[in-house]
Image (cartoon, grey):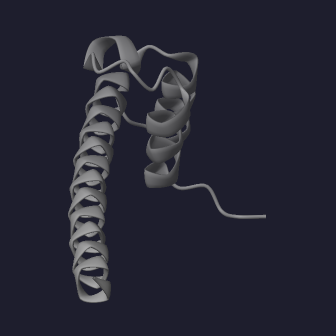
Amino acid sequence: MKRASYRAGVRWIAENDEPLCMIEREIGFFVSSLMLADLFGVEPERVGRDVVRVRRALVRAARRQEKIDAENWQVEREYVAEQLKERD
């Protein structure tokens, strides 16, 4: 069994508990956030702030990945076009 950590709890909440909510005060009063705050002796508002911070980081990472995917697709498309030109 893994040992509990505050960071892992914040990450879990960010990914699983109302993942579209970005309102710190509201997130701080989710049952999961209150439990995490109680377990680690922090204020619920801090949990809310940390969850929003992680969610923003996840959004930035997803956008970067989408950009990389789009760039890779463009490179692959150009490569295929070159290969088809060489055949003709």
Where is residue 4? Give x, y as percent: 61, 55
Q: In this view, does 45 lie above or below 13?
A: above
Front-lying residue, 7 or 70: 70
Q: Which residue is drawn at 39% across and 19% down?
A: 27
Judged from this view, the residue extending furthest toward the front is: 88
Q: In this view, does 38 lie above or below 72?
A: above
Where is residue 11? Give x, y as percent: 46, 46
Front-lying residue, 80 or 49: 80
Where is residue 21? Give x, y as percent: 36, 18
Q: Which residue is drawn at 50% across and 34% down?
A: 13
With 83 as the anchor, is 39 left or right in this view? right
Q: In which quarter of the image is residue 78?
A: bottom left
> In what quadrant of the picture does the N terminus appear?
bottom right
Q: Residue at x 51, y 53 (%)?
A: 8
> In what quadrant of the picture does the C terminus appear?
bottom left
Q: Is residue 57 above or below residue 1?
A: above
Judged from this view, the residue extending furthest toward the bottom is: 86
Q: In which quarter of the image is residue 19?
A: top left
Q: Residue at x 47, y 49 (%)?
A: 6
With 35 as the anchor, is 49 left or right in this view? left
Q: Is residue 21 above or below residue 61?
A: above
With 52 as the anchor, is 39 left or right in this view? right
Where is residue 75? Give x, y as percent: 22, 72
So how many labels did they put on this image?
A: 0
Front-lying residue, 58 or 67: 67
